[in-house]
Amino acid sequence: MDKEIRILIVDDEKITLRNLEHILKKEGYTVKTTTSGQNALRLLNREIYDLVLTDLKMERVDGMQILKRTKEISPDTEVIMITGYATVETAIEAMRHGAYHYLTKPFKLEEVRKVIREASEKILLKKENRELRDKLGSISERIMIITQDPMMLRILDTAREIAPTDCNVLITGESGTGKELIARYIHRHSKRASKPFIAVNCGAFNEELLANELFGHEKGAFTGATPLKEGLIEMASGGTLFLDEITEMAPSMQVKLLRVIQEREFYRVGGREPVRVDVRFIAATNRDIQGVLESGELRQDLYYRLNVVTFHLPPLSERKGDIPLLCYHFLRKYTALMGKEVREISEGVINLLSSYTFPGNIRELENIIERAVALCKGESIETAHLPEDLRGFTIRTFRTSDGRIPSLEEHEKNYILWVLNETGGNKSEAARILGIDRVSLWRKLKRFGIED
């Protein structure tokens, strides 16, 4: 057993005290003993113990007083009551004041070992949770992205270095890996931090709507265009414009965007006078860059303008060490939003989530923790609060019937089909689970040749 568990034993029967001390030291615990309740209170005032075993009936200071004082000084310390005068009333009173367990003399040594082992596991879990919360707090104070992963920390260091330079940036990575967070991080550390950060999903609009969103329109430019409308590029002037899913933008729109980047000016829809702007562009895509360049979906000249600095974000499956931190980050977020008192995540849940591949990346993990907080009625998230398919997931080797390892695109297609099947063909629900908007899902279905 972990030697970090410090135990105080209080019993006025010296034989019982010696036996317990011998057993627990042999198990590897650090043990302190006393035959006096008064002395026990002095010891508790001087130092913190992880576990207290105390006899109930003692002269002057009894076990119930020790229990109450222990919980006042250190609420996380577990207390086990020992007595030869067990009654239902005293047991209920002890539990009501926070006792972990109740042992009746004469007790079996194996029973003592078992109870102490279980209490120790609970204590160690609380310690780990507290360390994770402390670590999460220190990370949150320094940066807005929760990570301790070496690769992500290097990305953040580089992002902080290039942030003041004003160069355009391209961010690649799977859906749900935090591309917009990196864009916001760069903006926050740039000279433009006090100016607007505006994000637009290029895959959410057709060409005409996107032109209107980006460039705005003049009064009377088309039917219904009564007032003049500023576009997002104009609104972002002095700040940063984040273009998500840049590869979904129509080629003709890419030409117009290229001109803005080169000339720092544009025309509103229906406009005749150029509008001058000072904008930093950060673009992102979840697609393979070389593939979209070769297919012509992304213009090379636009790519070279945006690709001054590139960041590729690793999927969550390559950042396993971040999973516990992210779990507690989302736990804190959703307990505050829902007004719940969930404080811990069981070791079983952390182990299960750390073994999962997370095809939906961080967004999927956030959904899982949000759901668990909503379902949890106690203080700790358990495996029962996880989705049923996650609780029963198994690691598989993905090979086709002819033994070939399928491509990433085939994996994506198969996963989308699986999610659609699970949602009964509900595209809105499928898009939410996949962490993309409905238009992006429609585009993917069209690209894969998937019909209704």
Image: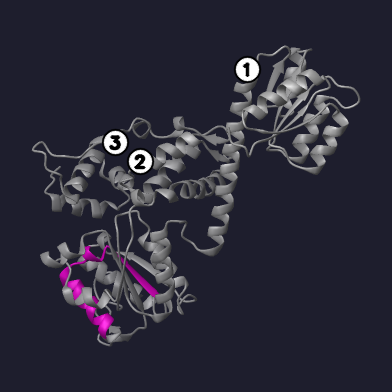
Mark 1 neighbour class, 10 Å CA radius: few under 14, some 14 to 19, many 20 or more: few
SS class of the residue under badge 3? Answer: loop
User: Vertical placement of 36 versus 111: above or below?
Assistant: below
Please provide the residue range marked out in magenta: 240-262
SS class of the residue under badge 1? Answer: helix
Q: Main secondary structure of the magenta part?
A: helix
* Upstream in sequence: badge 2 or badge 1: 1
User: Vertical placement of 338 versus 100: above or below?
Assistant: below
> Of 160 and 217, which appears nearest the observer?
160
Residue 395, disc: 3
Name the amino acid, label 1. Answer: Glu
Residue 410 colored in magenta in the image: no
* Upstream in sequence: badge 1 or badge 3: 1
Give the distance between the C-alpha atoms of the residues marked 2 and 1, in whole angstroms: 36 Å
Q: Position of residue 373 (x, y in %)?
A: 50, 39
Q: Which residue is mark 2?
A: 356
User: Vertical placement of 394 versus 109: above or below?
Assistant: below
The residue sitting at the right extreme is: 60
User: Vertical placement of 284 versus 87: above or below?
Assistant: below
